[in-house]
Amino acid sequence: MTLDIIVPVYRGFEAVRRCIESVLSFPQQAQFELIVVDDACPEPELVRWLREQRDRKRITLLQQPARQGFSAAVNRALALHRDRDAVILHSDVEVANDWLDRLAAHAARGRDIGTVAPFASYGGVAGYPRTGFRNALPDGHTVASLDSVFRRANFGASVAVPLTCGPCVYLRRECVTAIGAFDGGPLGSDYGVEQDFCLRASSAGFHHVLAADVFVGHAGAVAFGVTDAQALAARAEKALDKLFPHYPVLRAEFLKNDPARPFQRQVDLLRLAESPKHLLLFITHAWGGGIRRHMTELAAMASERCEVLFLEPAAGTTVKLSWPKDAEGFSAYFTLPDDSPALVLLLRTLGVARMHFHHIHGLPRAVLDLPGAVGVPYDCTLHDYYAICPQYHLVTEDGRYCGEPDAVGCAACLTRRPGQWGLDIGAWRGAFGRLLRGAERVLAPSRDVARRIARYFPDVETTILPHPEEPIAAMTRVTRVVTLGNLSPEKGLRVVAACAEDARARNLPLSFRVLGSTTEPVPLWPQAPLSIHGQYADGELPTILAAERPDVIWFPAQVPETYSYTLSVALAAGVPIVAAALGVFPERLANHSCAMVVPWGAAPEIWNEALLRAGQGGRVEGTRPVPAKLTVS
């Protein structure tokens, strides 16, 4: 049986050429005809190339007289051969290997199958490494190599899904004949036509399948010239909800159950097992902070030669094994000690070469046995004093250094504050003494840590190795700008918010501080370089201002002030002042040597220029204070 591969084209020469060449470069057992529909493409170079491919009999080319959209292009091609199954490919898709044969094999498994879809890097019913993300290809992989991993990890596997959509969808002819072609009319656009097709097909008794052993690459947002994709997709979802009242529940259940996840994880595991890099396991707590930063930096430093997994607590005695790279989605959960054999087997299968204990807080005691069970060497880093004290930081109940009392004192402390695993101090130090003595390397970031540990484990050799850090960039001097009093729109609140946004957008060295409160919410740090002190009593302002040590005091009033008591405080502070050239400010600042006034309706860029100049005036070589009579415009 011959299949039709339908590629609607509107624009994107390089993407279209890559798509078509990928289809034609990989032989298939299934016979197919490649049908390209030119939907009035506006790119002459692309039109010429498509005609060349037609003349060379590589493709069948259909040309629309005017642009009619994705659905019309697909429907025209579907009508060409009414006895053939068809695969709809977006023109920015890349396929590889025997992708078509595998899709066709899934489609042939039942007469009630309506559609089949593969995994894709972006879009569709299932993504990889993560669904719902614009995934880049993992390091070291091409579409062909990753599709090969999918084939080996999930060969022949599929799972039922409520519908299919996206950059590659296989349509069985019986389904098309039974329910008709694509129809964007009820949706208001071509967005959602595949979902609509599938939901109509489900009502007619057809089922839909995710082919777990096929992967295609998809650039996304190239194929059909859509500029407002998110808005169109949202509108399509609303229309589908009205047309198919059961659809919201169906969608929610699909997202909750995530049937693609087991197959994604199988691919993850095969990639890890076949990686040419050494595989390391970092064992740690689930907190962030300095330990997580250190591990992340170590993983980045070793990334050319090593892959790193994290093992951390989840809940109770359950631990989470994960691949902590931002672009990866792998995680697996084990309850210890019951699942210890399964975890050990997985770590051995993946080829973990070394473990590294960074912390044990929240982890079950069985993690201490993992290196021996897996049969690999391990290291320990002493980020704190977990090896000698269940409180980790040698801290008393009132948050102070305990002075490291004798064992009797430690036992008394644990009576009041039981430690992890219910161990007394002797059993605790016995367990960690064995752990440290069995380590290939025990690392301490300072001599002080090494000396303290040596008091308890004198036979343990500790290597002092400060944490490696990237060079810290020179700190840019930031001009600190304060406004005084409660800030409302008439006092310049919205001007302050706009200037803070401009400073953030242009990365200006400005920091804004409201000494008072605001009458309406504004974006604050970290969304904008703006913070609020809160209300104060009038007599407290001079002290608060001295503590803030501002570089500039700013009065951005948007109405003509009649006097301003806070201006009196600002003048007494001897700090440069920037104010609106409105109301009393030009008059009262006329004899102030470190002030400038700015038109009250100035753009944020003008205000910020004035604030930067005022804040640096008299402090930066070559600059002079600007008198109030000089207006910035």
Image (cartoon, rainbow, N blue to C red):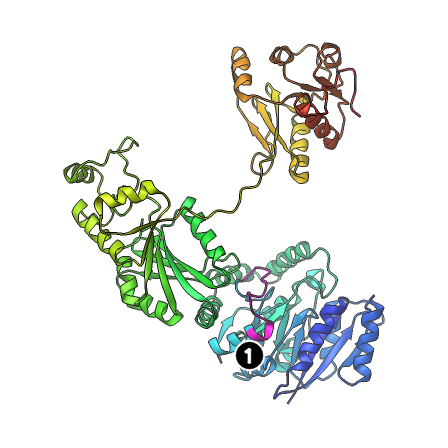
Q: Residue at x 66, y 65 (%)?
A: 219
The image quadrant that residue 118 belongs to is: bottom right
Position of 475 compared to 416: left or right? right
Q: Please identify the quadrant where the N terminus is shown.
A: bottom right
Residue 620, how many percent across, how many down?
67, 25
1 and 377: which is toward the camera? 377
Q: Please identify the quadrant where the C terminus is shown.
A: top right
Q: Which residues are magenta?
A: 131-145
Q: Residue at x 42, y 44 (%)?
A: 290
Q: Is residue 138 shown in magenta?
A: yes
The image quadrant that residue 283 belongs to is: bottom left
Count of all numbered marks drawn on residues in the image: 1
Residue 139, how many percent across, how many down?
55, 65
Question: What secondary structure prevails in the magenta region?
Answer: loop
* Residue 222 in view, yes or no: yes
Residue 469, how many percent across, how many down?
48, 47
Q: Is residue 79 shown in magenta?
A: no
Residue 52, how many percent across, how many down?
82, 79
Give the secondary structure at mark 1: strand
Q: Is residue 542 above or below residue 401?
A: above
User: Which residue in the rendered view is the most extreme toward the left?
Assistant: 408
Q: Is residue 380 above or below residue 1?
A: above
Per the image, the residue denoted by label 1 is: 113
Badge 1: few (under 14), some or many (20 or more) residues near its Cα, within 10 Å? many
Q: Is residue 570 above or below residue 407?
A: above
373 and 160: which is toward the camera? 373
Disc 1 residue type (three-letter): Ile
Position of 508 compared to 41: left or right? left
* Residue 154 in view, yes or no: no
